[in-house]
Image (cartoon, rainbow, N blue to C red):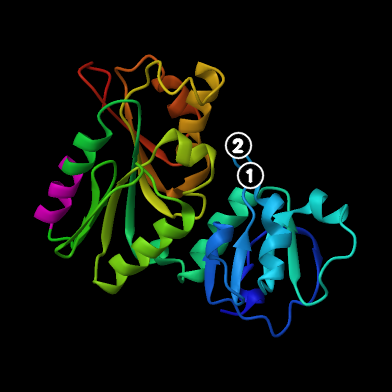
Amino acid sequence: MELKLLIDGVEVEHYNGSLDNRNVIALQSDSRAVKSNDMYIALPGTKTDGHNFIEEVVKKGCKSVLCEAEWLKQQKNLNVETTYIGVKDRRKAFATISANFYGNPTKSMYMVGVTGTNGKTTSTHIIENILKEAGKNTGILGTLYSRYAGIQVDAKYTTPMSDELQKTFKDMLDHNVDSVVMEVSSHALDQSRVGSCDFSAAVFTNLTQDHLDYHPTFEAYKEAKGILFKDLVKTSGISVINLDDPNSKYFIENSRAKVITYGLTDKAD
């Protein structure tokens, strides 16, 4: 894919090198796997930073690099044959680039995202069966596996990395899947792995103390979950909220889509 098309929609703050006559055949966030016509995605990590491996991949012949704009501005003696794309948020840019690379497959499917501390796996399987009964060719993706069109692949994570996720969606679309239901973890939301997914429906199950080894506070955990409702579900879509949960008000108030509530209380829709 042409580099110009690949970075369409990416908020590029600074770049070095040519954007013309640059073709990317694969996306790589693992420096060890990079080849000359790949784009290296220098992601931030918990123990090290992808910036530390840029010099290494360039020596291997890599011609396209995604990096942080402030890092790029500080560099001298950059390789003139490599194009460096500088952005503010590398993870968000990675999500957009991944979606572009695979042709934005979620725009062509009915996407349901389910988030919450507990009940995501059960809920996605219930919704999968509802969609199947409605005659939809349905795919499911979550903690256990991705499954569609007779294909089942065991899951490494609840929500895969952006490029793996979009590759799976593209394969689903190629197998005529028209509806997808998936678990959306707080890690994936915080790290923008689903940043370029077009969700028609967002479902909130519940929220309890969890993942505070990753999220600094419970509020930060709640806000990460809220991204699905604030930023990712279509304004023309629906947000389905568990009214019995004490945190439901937050998700209702922060949803940009029409809200439908459920629960044991008489106040639920």
Q: Which residues are magenta?
A: 126-134
Q: At x 81% / y 70%, what residue is drawn? A: 79
In percent of width and height, residue 195 lies at 52, 50
In percent of width and height, residue 57 lies at 66, 65
Q: Secondary structure at mark 2?
A: loop
Viewer can see residue 256: no
In percent of width and height, residue 50 lies at 65, 50
Vertical placement of 208 versus 120: above or below? above
Closer to viewer: mark 2 or mark 1: 2
Q: Secondary structure at mark 1?
A: loop
Secondary structure that dominates the magenta span: helix
Vertical placement of 118 versus 144: above or below? above
Q: Residue 129's mark?
A: none
Judge from the rendering whether residue 76 lies leftward or rightward of residue 83; answer left or right: right
Seen from the viewer's position, the closer of residues 165 and 155 is: 155
Mark 2 = which residue?
47
> Residue furthest toward the bottom?
21
In percent of width and height, residue 25 lies at 53, 77
Mark 1 = which residue?
44
Judge from the rendering whether residue 50 lies leftward or rightward of residue 193; answer left or right: right
Q: At x 32% / y 57%, what residue is drawn? A: 110
Looking at the rendered structure, the kind of residue marked 1 is: Pro
Judge from the rendering whether residue 74 lies leftward or rightward of residue 132; answer left or right: right
